[in-house]
Amino acid sequence: MSATEITVIGNIVTAPSRVRTQNGSVTNFRLASTERRYDSATQGFVDGATFFVDVECWGELSGNVSHSVSKGDPVIVRGVMRTHEWESEHGRRTRPVVKAEAVGLNLNRGTAEFRKTQRPSVAAPAEQEPPAAHEPPGDRDYAAGERALYELDHDQSGVDAPLDAQPEPALH
């Protein structure tokens, strides 16, 4: 069976909410897409019907969306349509949901600054070379808390600041 793919252009109408589940983290928000059409009587564009849909973002997309978009932002969402079903006191209920594969700001409505997500190296631990003195260690080399301390102890010029203690490499 094939999935129903959809692209929706609209505005976020609820603040994105991130929740951690046993299956990973998910960020949810509601999207409104209002059609615009030309009205010859008024010689201008007018709003038509509004389509509302819930959007769910899983995995790495979940974190990126929760840190990047807010209520009111114009976005473009691409994903797969699903029907969420549940039982209520009024009987069986359903609502459409888009499981997002990609979410982006609609640059037809404004500008944005983009920062790539930093990913750890995929090389095997034995093949990794130690980082240069001016480069922060990768997540695979140090625990998250030690990485944060390392970054705080190094100035912006890339020259090591005096350190009281160097972080110990994590055992692999």
Image (tube, grey):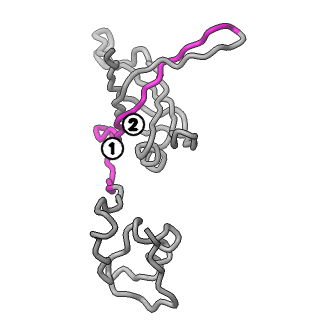
Residue located at (47% from left, 85% from top): 166
Circles 2 and 1: CB atoms closer than 8 Å:
yes
Q: Amino acid at mark 2?
A: Pro
Give the quadrant of the N terminus: top left
Q: How far across and down, in percent of the image, does residue 26 sit?
A: 51, 39
Q: Amino acid at mark 1?
A: Gly
Q: Which mark is residue 74?
A: 2
Mark 1 is surrounded, within 10 Å at the Cα level, by few (under 14), some (14 to 19) or many (20 or more) other residues, namely few
Q: Nearer the viewer, residue 145 or 27?
A: 145
Relative to 58, is 168 above or below? Answer: below
Q: Secondary structure at mark 1?
A: loop
Q: How far across and down, in percent of the image, does residue 16 sit?
A: 52, 40
94 left or right, relative to 106: right
The CA distance from mark 2 to mark 1 is: 9 Å
Highlighted magenta segment, given as a residue range: 90-116
17 left or right, relative to 112: right
Residue located at (36% from left, 19% from top): 35
38 left or right, relative to 85: left
Name the residue carrying label 1: 110
Magenta segment includes 64: no
127 left or right, relative to 65: left
